[in-house]
Image (cartoon, helix red, strand yellow):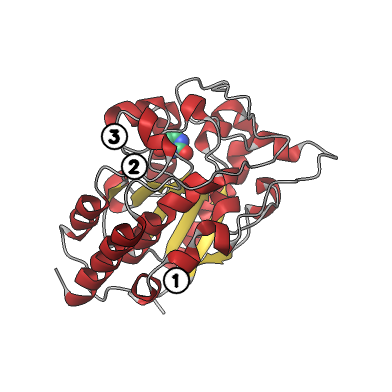
Amino acid sequence: MSEDVRELVGAVRTYLQVHGRGRHFATGSWVDPGSGRDGSAGALGGSSGAGDGPDHVPGTAPVAETVTDREFGREDFGSKLETVAPARIEAGDLDQLREVWGECTRCSLAGGRTNLVFGEGAAPADLMFIGEGPGEQEDLQGRPFVGRAGELLTKMIEAMGLSRDLVFIANIVKCRPPGNRDPEPGEVTSCLPVLLAQIRLVRPRVIVSLGRISAQTLLSSGTPIGRLRGRWHCFEGVDLMPTFHPAYLLRSPEKKKEAWQDLQLVMEKLREPHA
Ligand code: URA
């Protein structure tokens, strides 16, 4: 392990020592008329509800709570975690991070999970996908995007001329929210340090956020996914393209065309010479 990776993993370890694995954050709730917050699994049943769709209902002003930096817990981060960007990644660095993160119990999602779904793929990788949180199959198998939505994501990645083992796939929260409800801000806060550390280890050139929750969380925005997608944003210095969640695309196949346009923008960006 290189020195800066050691420093990054050490910063996460320190963070956990300071805040503990068992700290339960006070949870507020997301307020969004279209979030399907009744806990229903949606049309997909076993996969994340990923309620992208209702954002498009005319006249429903988005009132999603903005997740501020404070709610994200950034002020809690050690300065090292903020600044360390490893120069070299070695096989095993992510395993080390996984080990340090351990069987996290920092929010109440831990109580309902079968497996913590850390994420998987290549590191470094040019492209990183960030979904919302594990669904039923992911929880059972401990791997991200392995249900029906995952099958579609795999096809999307392959249509880009890539494969799952060439990209990194992660989620905003690592444990399944009950009934596939949206993760709450406190749960997002608890998981953010490990996601940030993953981004630093994967060093993607482009992040694709999948669905409303992922985009709104990463961008600290309440803007509907229909308005966020198709445009470049920036997260942690990395180009970010929001697109629809594959679970939503399964329910609304007519939206696949727009998602494909988003992915073509990503492919164009990846073809650009490295800065
Ligand atoms: N939906 C997500 O957002 N993530 C997964 O891993 C699976 C379904």
Asked if the residues shown at circle 2 and circle 1 are in contact, with their CB atoms under 8 angstroms apart, the answer is no
| 20 or 115, nearer to the observer | 20
CA gap, disc 1 to disc 3?
34 Å
Q: Relative to residue 223, is residue 3 drawn left or right?
A: left
How busy is the neighbourhood of tag 3: few (under 14 within 10 Å), some, or many (20 plus)?
Answer: many
- Residue 265: in sight, yes or no? no
> Is residue 199 positioned above or below 95 on the image?
below
Q: Position of residue 29 (x, y in %)?
A: 62, 41
Identify which amino acid the numbered label 1 is placed on.
Glu
Q: Secondary structure at mark 1?
A: loop
In the rendered image, the quadrant that contains the C terminus is: bottom left
Callout in the foreground (2, 1): 2
In the rendered image, the quadrant that contains the N terminus is: bottom left
CA gap, disc 2 to disc 1?
41 Å
Pointer 3 or 2: first along the chain = 2
Q: Which residue is mark 2?
A: 105
